[in-house]
Image (cartoon, coloured by chain):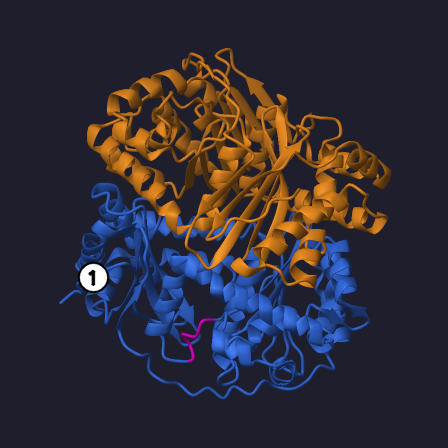
Chain colours: A blue, B orange
Amino acid sequence: MAERYFQHSFPNGLTLLAEKMPGMKSAAMTFLMAAGASTDPVDRCGSATVLSDLILRGAGMRDSRQLTDYLDSLGLQRSSSVGVHDTRLGCAAVSAKVMESLPTYADIVRKPHLPEEGFTAARDLALQSLAGIDDEPRQKLMIKLREWYFPSPYGRNTMGRTEDLEKLTLELCKADWQQRYKAHDAIIAVAGDVDFGQLRSEIERHFASWNGKAAADVNVMPPPGQFHHEHQKSEQTHIGIAYPSIPETHADYYTARLAVEVLSGGMSGRLFTEVREKRGLCYSVWAGYSSLKGSGSIFGYAGTSNERAQATLDCFIGELHRLQKGVTEPEMQRAKIGLKTSTIMQGESTSARAGAIAHDFFMRGRIRTLEEIKDAIEAVTVDKVNAYLKAHEPGPFTIVTVGPKELKLPQ
Amino acid sequence: MAERYFQHSFPNGLTLLAEKMPGMKSAAMTFLMAAGASTDPVDRCGSATVLSDLILRGAGMRDSRQLTDYLDSLGLQRSSSVGVHDTRLGCAAVSAKVMESLPTYADIVRKPHLPEEGFTAARDLALQSLAGIDDEPRQKLMIKLREWYFPSPYGRNTMGRTEDLEKLTLELCKADWQQRYKAHDAIIAVAGDVDFGQLRSEIERHFASWNGKAAADVNVMPPPGQFHHEHQKSEQTHIGIAYPSIPETHADYYTARLAVEVLSGGMSGRLFTEVREKRGLCYSVWAGYSSLKGSGSIFGYAGTSNERAQATLDCFIGELHRLQKGVTEPEMQRAKIGLKTSTIMQGESTSARAGAIAHDFFMRGRIRTLEEIKDAIEAVTVDKVNAYLKAHEPGPFTIVTVGPKELKLPQ
């Protein structure tokens, strides 16, 4: 790797990644641990989410208030979230302040206080967020689509399940923390104004004695079915479509990605022009590639008025089938420049790059350089895409709708 | 100005701004024209919004499809939106491609085709977006809050009004385009990898013969009242609060801004810790400074379960009053570093800087350097903030709620 990219694996299984970005004063960190919704304890869906809040309520020598005040005194722009595979902590600030925060992040994951009153508040907030979904039909649709498309537990709502959250206790959270907040397979990625030598010794000092490996005991079950309608009294019908693609580690990955770009990249994408611009069927429509470890999928969405819903679904499915007939050279050129431009723009954001190298390592076990990505996009031709599309009939489709009326499904 | 910032006003009243950002390969453009919702023709609310869509449906030598394809072939990440004061077109891409797009942007604003079928589609989509608000109670709340807080027409919903959109015609849109898409007071701002000499001559070539001034004939009327409840059958109650502050051109601007940061900056902000973390009353709460030309305001929001709504409102108002009693030195330090960090991070984003220098010029008639902003933040002391807060009792409050039940208002 060039002097822009750095990687070091510690004996405990923790991997440190870094990208030195010229001209930046800031740095961003992404911290991944193998505590995702798919490994939430049985019947305790939402445990990782409650825990990701609870660990910030006091750690090391600081109580909840002191910890929050301290992290804000560094000017850190912080985030925390739970995905299918992992719990993700993120921060960005002036580079020196991100460095200064590292011992505290070690406290947060290794020495959280996990206090009783903090647990009650964290669980209450999780329950409230969950109840709030009923007011957000678009978000509700995407949650339901994942539940009906992915084999369980990969389709679980990362926010948890009401009945499980109600039964969650502080003791279960403590046990869960002990089982899943482990060094092995954890990833720390820092991008921006980085001195890798200094970063590595800081991480070594605070994380080298961290140990253990999260047990990943996942019992995979098929999803409940392919079609689901969720009744909701509403002005709009929300339509979600999902079907399998190839994993992002596959040699044809960018071939598949560019095909989806023709469908839904930029404003000249087929879905946007055919469904929205030409036929005025809906105000929001898109499709995109989505990745889990070992599998890739295409997810699509359309939000439309109730009376236009059937025509929108039909038109959407029609475009998915029409894509198989092939794309044109100009469509391909636009798709390629669109994806290359996104890559270049991402190369100017410390947060985007920290997230990207962490994602790369999780998916592939290594960092990809920006040049490698650009070259891979460049190497795809219209012939490759058309051969790929010919060989991969879209489907089987999982279709979920949220609205006042069921729709007629294709065939 | 240093060699980072550039400004040039053309005889027709168009102003070109630029910021050369070292290390960037991309550039971003923000293009503002004095066609905002506040100057939509009487009884034709939403005209600027429909027009901002319609101008992209063919311009110069390209029809709608050709124009979309061409802009995507440059890899432009595009946006368009309508605010209170202006219509805003934005794009970002590799620098050379943004330069290449300039003649086409000249076509879009100066020679749009404004076709009949495009008008029908654009108006339909505007009507659909508007109908969609009923499914988005949070967005609905903020729209209603602006309507009840600002004097008309400054509180208008920029998306328009259903009955007005239904009466809108292509002829009215054409007339509106002729009246408001004018060179005078228009601003083009480009940030990133910029050669100002080249940029200026390109802009001169394509925009120097553009002429005219938008007539700003605004008839100001007081808002309908201070308190409003919008009934909605929903799991949540959404609470919005607004009250006056000083304009951002005021010498005490950063004093006022930092006071709001203490209230709602980072995760140690008082609203977050008191309302959310300590009392678990709601999952989302914030307050922030908001700016129109000549006036500043504080807007606040809380989203909460119906049974916690009254306690949340009371606690929110309580915090607004408590702020007047003063802030502490540590709160002040955190607020300052938070705001300075945001400024530094913004200095690494071409889109953020293009937007910021355009905003600066619109509000102040000049660009502020990042150093000037940092110095202004640095100069604020806890004594200044406390003196300011003592002299400025919060209120009068405009309070709007969306949910199943009215709340008891303060006093």
Q: Nearer the viewer, residue B211 or A304?
A: A304
Q: Quadrant of residue B195?
A: top right
Q: Nearer the viewer, residue B378 or B316?
A: B316
Q: Is residue A126 visible?
A: yes
Image location of residue B29, percent across then percent down: 49, 34
| Residue type at the position of mark 1 | Leu
Image location of residue A308, percent across then percent down: 22, 50
Position of the N terminus of chain B, as image quadrant, is top right
Report the number of discs: 1
Q: Residue at x 49, y 73 (%)?
A: A160
The residue that disc 1 covers is A407
> In the displayed structure, would residue A401 be above or below residue A205?
above
Position of the C terminus of chain B, as image quadrant, is top right
Q: Which SS class for mark 1?
A: loop
Q: Is residue B269 visible?
A: no
Q: Residue at x 40, y 24 (%)?
A: B40
Highlighted magenta segment, given as a residue range: A153-157
> In the displayed structure, would residue B16 be above or below residue A30?
above
Q: Residue at x 78, y 68 (%)?
A: A63
Local crowd size for mark 1, using a 10 Å CA cut-off: few (<14), some (14–19), many (≥20): some
Image location of residue B367, percent across then percent down: 64, 27
Query: Is residue A146 part of the magenta span, yes or no?
Result: no
Q: Residue at x 74, y 41 (%)?
A: B259
Q: Nearer the viewer, residue B217 or A121?
A: A121
Image location of residue A108, percent across then percent down: 71, 71
Left or right of A273 on screen, residue A49: right
Left or right of A116 on screen, residue A394: left
